[in-house]
Image (cartoon, coloured by chain):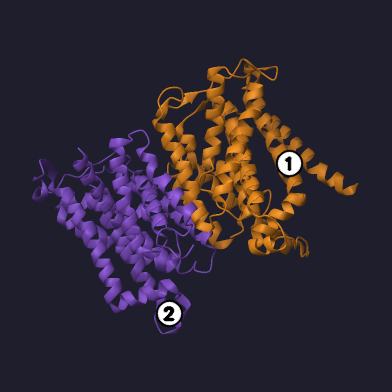
Chain colours: A purple, B orange
Amino acid sequence: MLAVNLFNGLVYGALLIVMSSGLALIYGLRRVVNFAHGALYMLGAYIGYTVAMHSNFWVALCVAPLAMAVVGVLLDRYVFQPLQDHEPLNVMLVTFGLLLILEDLVAFIWGKANYSLFTPELLAFSVRFMRHDLPAYRIGVIVVGAAVALGLTLWLRFSKAGLFVRAASTDPVTTSMQGVNTDRLSAGVVGLGSALAGLAGVVAAPFLSLSPHMSSDVLIDSFVVVVIGGLGSLAGAFAAALLLGMMQSIGAVYLPEVSVLLPFIFMIAVLIWKPSGLAGSRT
Amino acid sequence: MMHLLRLLSWPLLALAAGAAIVLVTRSNSLLGMFTQAVIYAIFALGVGVLLRQNGLVSFGHALYFGAAGYGMGVVLTLGWLPAELAMPLVLAALGAAAFLIGLVIVRVPGIAFGMLTLAIGQMAYLLAARARGLTGGADGMSIPWPNTLFGVPQSVLLQPSVLFMVSWVVLVAVAVALACLLRTRFGAITEAIRDNEERARFIGIRTTVPRALVYALSAMVTGVAGLLSSLNTGFVSPENLHWSVSAITLLMVVVGGFRKPMGPIVGAVIYFLFKDLLGEYATHSMAIFGAALIAVIVFSPDGITGAAQRLFQRLFQRKKGEGRA
């Protein structure tokens, strides 16, 4: 029982890693708390659903993140960049406005019914591990989460673009004075972050159902993750995402009444102890 | 004397305007919509006062809106107190709880504060949605209001025109009370802290308690709106606590303009007017609100009241109102 819950915690943690690393990247570069991230996740899931219905899941897994990357680049170019000098609160509310628009758009195109996507045939088996049957698809989700975490870490650590991103996250003005085109860099990073939201949406589609309200829960959980980890810190977000996934699923065994509250209680405790989050130096 | 007269003339004018609205409006459904707008205007005043005096954004004020309804529901169902006594007591309890929460959370700066309020609000939502028994879980609970309230029978009180007038009077009273309170030393202190906490501390002002007091004040104003709403609908459900309620109200505050005391009220009225107008033509009112919100923030960051003031100044070429622009 506990092993299965640990496993499911890991699955949800992996999904949160994919979601919240996008949020953290965007916050790092643009200092925007992006409510629209939830809408991009939802849009990714719906686009993935439609594509998967017409071809197959694997095409959807490529198309939806790409489509969201395009949306993300446009979002940066036409929303975040012109609003750079506005107050953070106002930009945050603009992204909330975008969330409202996109949620309505999804309800308009796909209707308000719930959908769910079939597990792709290739992964529709289960693996026997320590006397438990673990669905292969969920193992795949964990692999995706790990790959995203590893890939992003390596990219930021060892590539030139990664170096620029780290520099611009620390001090955008000095970085652009050194000759880095921070606007183009931001467009790329917001595009990447949005693609990750789309990826999370497609990956989640076979085991969480699709509805116009699906964005809210995951969005709030990812906010909690990003805030606990320290706004803008990727390593903090990875750790917090895994902690949160574990906490929820283990809490469901031992403290069923309050398991849904655990992430919030944990967040409140962390923020009171360290207002900038576990790994954050900024506020 | 002139000053006092001017101070008194606004509320009297406002009350007269309310009576005029009741007399002019024939349709009961329209009056019902106005009542809702007025209730949310009070709610928005609560969110606005926190933003204006503390510079803090709350994404969780629905907590106090819903908690007021749940408080009344529980007290009345258990028959602990008569409703007339229960109302001020529920408000006082909300204020005390908010003060304690405020003491802890106002230390957290900026965006993290908003996320904290969001977390606390969602906790309340999840608790209410899952708690079985008295509060009815996800189905919500109906509130057993007594047959007479302050000597007024329910059949009279729940008439749309009466309920509207009651809400309107409460709105005017809350607005006047806030305006008076913020003219005192307390208002000046909180503004000083908002503008520069460190400097305020250097000149010997303790900064946490006043900010927690503003938080409690804003929670109580929101609670008043919650009480009125629970009287209006006779019902409270977890939906009242959901974060989207907080966010929509914040939207009203920003669209109206939070720098002006009247801004939140204007925002709430505009929101409901638009919702009513659009409701007949489009089912996608939320997308239109989203677009309107973006337009207002981009073109007039101090909201509609700010834009109106600028327009007014340009039209009359007067150099008035340099106060707090």
Considering depth in this image, is B183 or A269 the residue closer to the camera? A269
Report how far apart the C-alphas of labels 2 and 1 lie in the structure. Answer: 50 Å
Residue B175 placement (x, y as % from top left): 70, 42
* Position of A23 relative to B222 (above/below): below
Considering depth in this image, is B146 or A142 the residue closer to the camera? A142
Mark number displayed over residue B199: none
Q: State the residue position of label 2.
A: A175
Residue A45 placement (x, y as % from top left): 27, 51
Number of marks? 2
Q: Amino acid at mark 1?
A: Ala
Residue B292 visible (yes or no): no
> Is B182 left, or right, of A132 in this rendering?
right
Considering depth in this image, is B220 or A106 the residue closer to the camera? B220
> Is A64 left, or right, of A171 in this rendering?
left
Mark number displayed over residue B177: 1
Quarter of the rendering containing residue B25: top right
Q: Amino acid at mark 2?
A: Thr
* Position of A203 relative to A80 (above/below): above
Name the residue located 45 percent from the left edge and 75 percent from the top edge: A172
Quarter of the rendering containing residue B156: top right
Residue A108 placement (x, y as % from top left): 35, 46
Name the residue located 33 percent from the left edge and 35 percent from the top edge: A255
Q: Label 1 is found on which chain of the structure?
A: B
Q: Label 2 is found on which chain of the structure?
A: A
How many neighbours does mark 2 have within 10 angstroms: few (below 14), some (14-19), or many (20 or more)? some
